[in-house]
Amino acid sequence: MATGTELAFLVPIGQVADEPCQMARADGLLYGQLLGHRVIDPLQHHVSSAVTNNAAVVRIWQLMLENGEGNKRVSQAQMAHARAVRWSGRTTLMDCPNTVAYFPALFLPATIGLGAGWLAGLSPWRTVLLGRVLMLAAFLAMGAAALALARWGHALLFAMLMLPMTVSLAASFNVDGQMIGAAALAAALLTSDPEREPARRWLAAALLVLMIMTKPPYMPLLFIGLLPLAQPRWRAVLARLSLLAVPSLVWLGVAHHVSAAPIYHVAPYHPGPLWPGRHDLWLTTIDPAAGLRSLIAHPLAVVLLPLHALAANAPLYLREAIGTLGWLSVILPRWDYQGWSLALLVALLGTMLAGPADRRSAGDAGFAALLVLGGVLAMMLAVYLSWTYTGYDRIDGIQGRYFLVILPFLLFLRPGPGWRPGTVASRQAIETLAALPAAVMALANLAVLPQILARIFY
């Protein structure tokens, strides 16, 4: 909590990855913008997606990013100008095609903060900070609930929630912080007994639906609710979970019909080797439909592209998941990455060794592994379709933080029953010891991380 609060006030507005567009999505809800709408750029003559925003809110992050994104210092003059911005009643259109289709529920803490600040007469500067604080508060509430309600897996959940990247996202407008908190809480609720605590299981399903409506590629995780496979009325649970996937598909269809537009436009390029059509074409956008056509023409690429990306970039993804902050520009000390890598490994091993509070079969673990793998593949293929040049034989645009949403569900990948300690006390002792490295690293970051960010941005 202390580190997150410091980051919420210390990091310049807009200097967290994608924060301007995420802020625009939250502010747009105050103007009834449940979805964005297509607009034509009068200068570049291409179609994009935009939402209505308060001009004062936009002006805040524009001033903070006056020198550009990344490790750019913010001058005292910039800070003074941002604090001097006043409400004018004017609105503007904010181009944000990558976030307009996100379901609005997880943006509500930020939206409430922006609306409450305006109603209370706060300045735009303080209103934006209030939006950040409420996003952090919502994350902390979900994280605390996850640790309190989980029947096992506390070490892994704690380590993931304390990562520098997690805390940075949670203390910003970026909805990925809320996604990670919701994933942790959903995983914790799914450790409950399906017979004695069915309400918790359905609350987990509701959280997963909100996550999937925000980012549909995580849909395989919804079916973690089928565990344990030996639970009574398994077929009925499968049918209900399948029905819960329908709202996500409906939302995706409506969003595509109402506001879909190319995420970004690029210099003309020829399609890559996977493209089944003519290779002398000139393309200027990333076209998901054309990317899908490339995958259909090369079915093995559905598996080979993600595997190749993981094999080539796993250390990079791990470092980014631990904490390459800002716009992937703030690099932490080497000891931070080494310490957190060890902490995550110890937490995972402790979770595997302690095992669940009830017996799960090897089939349960295998089924969970398939769903986790399915979530990873779906996420990576979604990035291929949305961010990679058409027909290319690689995946561009994957960031380590995308894996953090999946990380809590590794607590269901436990070894066979023979590894399970026999008593509640022994399980708790193992998990407590396994969480200690993460606690040490969290305390170290509380002391060091604000200094690093202050040195970079000020």
Image: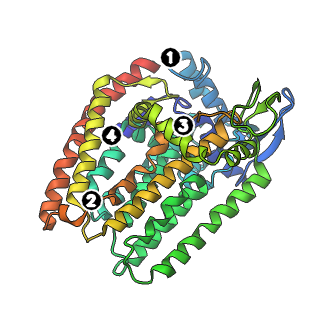
Nearest to N terminus: mark 3 or mark 2: 3
CA distance separating discs 4 and 3: 30 Å
CA distance separating discs 4 and 1: 24 Å
Q: Looking at the image, is mark 3 or mark 2 nearer the viewer? A: 2
Quadrant in the picture for residue 372: bottom left
CA distance separating discs 2 and 1: 49 Å
Q: Which residue is mark 2?
A: 415
Q: Which residue is mark 4?
A: 2
Nearest to N terminus: mark 2 or mark 4: 4
Q: Residue at x 71, y 41 (%)?
A: 97
Decide: is 362 above or below 369.
below
> What amino acid is found at the position of numbered circle 3 in the picture?
Ile
SS at badge 3 = loop
Is 264 on the left or on the right of 192, as rendered?
right
Quadrant in the picture for residue 166: top left
Asked whether the residues under the numbered discs 2 and 4 touch, taking CB atoms below 8 Å apart as contact, a structural biologist would say no
**Percent position (x, y) of residue 62?**
64, 27
Q: What label sits on residue 398 in the rendered view?
A: 3
**Percent position (x, y) of residue 303?**
55, 46
Q: What label sits on residue 444 in the rendered view?
A: none
Is 339 on the left or on the right of 304, as rendered?
left
Q: Residues within 10 Å of mark 1 (few under 14, many from 20)?
A: some
Residue 113 shows in this picture = no
Name the quadrant of the C terminus: top left
**Percent position (x, y) of residue 98?**
66, 41
Quadrant in the picture for residue 269: top right
Q: Residues within 10 Å of mark 2 (few under 14, many from 20)?
A: some
> What amino acid is found at the position of numbered circle 1 in the picture?
Arg
Q: Which residue is mark 1?
A: 73
Residue 209 shows in this picture = yes
